[in-house]
Every structure is written in C-alpha cells, then in structure tokens.
Amino acid sequence: MFEKKPQTIEESVRQLMIDRAWLEQQDSVSDTDSLVEHGVIDSLTMMELIGFLERTYEIQVTDDELIPENFETLSAIAGFVEQKRTS
C-alpha cells in the first residue's frame, strides 16, 4: 500500500515529527498549537528540524531567525519557510 506523500509544509513537518516520534499521532497538534507548550520542540529537536527545513526546502536559517515567532507553530514554520523561499 502506498503512503500519501505530504503536500504542504505543515504536512511535511508534521510527518517528520511523527517519524521521529516527537508526535504520537497525526492529529495530536493542530497547525496553530504551540509546539513548545505541547512538548514537541526542545533545543535538540529544534536543531534537527532546522536541518530538515534547510535540506528539504533549500533554505538557510540564520542565527537571528531562530526566534519563537518563526517556530512556535506548524503554521509559523510554514510561513517562515515560504518567506525564505520567496526572498
């Protein structure tokens, strides 16, 4: 059986979190839930997430972009990646 390939940035990041066991199931956080408050993201998982985003979306995340506003939610991550890809 073929697994559906993620289509959006949110789906792609959510799948990474499920694959790495940061999330137990696909619906455990919404696109607007705080990933920090839900215990999904910490300093170690953040580094892996950034590497994933840089490889997958061919962007470069700078130190000054490592702020909560860019990584607090799946929607924020998607917006950040889209902004990086269009700049």
Image (spheres, rainbow, N blue to C red):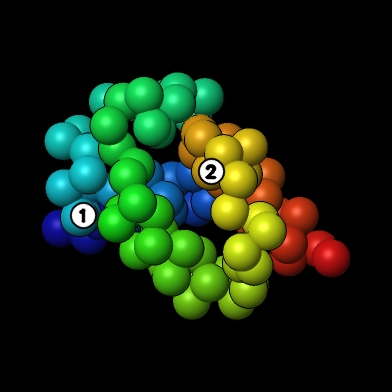
- What residue is rendered at 44% in x and 26% in y? 34
In the image, residue 63 sits, relative to residue 3, either above or below, namely: below
- What residue is rendered at 27% in x and 32% in y? 39
- What residue is rendered at 22% in x and 60% in y? 2
Element type where label 1 sits in the image: helix
- What residue is rendered at 53% in x and 72% in y? 54
Label 2 crowd (10 A; few <14 / some 14-19 / many >=20) = many
Element type where label 2 sits in the image: helix
Q: Amino acid at mark 2?
A: Phe
Q: Position of residue 31 (x, y in %)?
A: 49, 29
Residue 69: numbered disc:
none
Is residue 3 in view from this perspective?
yes
**Left-right relation of 7 to 46:** right
- The image shows a total of numbered marks equal to 2
- CA–CA distance between discs 2 and 1? 19 Å
The residue most toward the right is 87
Circles 2, 1 touching at the beta carbon (< 8 Å): no
Q: Position of residue 1 (x, y in %)?
A: 15, 58
State which tag comes first along the sequence, 2 or 1. Answer: 1
Disc 2 designates what residue? Answer: 71
Is residue 6 in view from this perspective?
no
In the image, residue 55 sits, relative to residue 79, either above or below, namely: below
Disc 1 designates what residue? Answer: 19
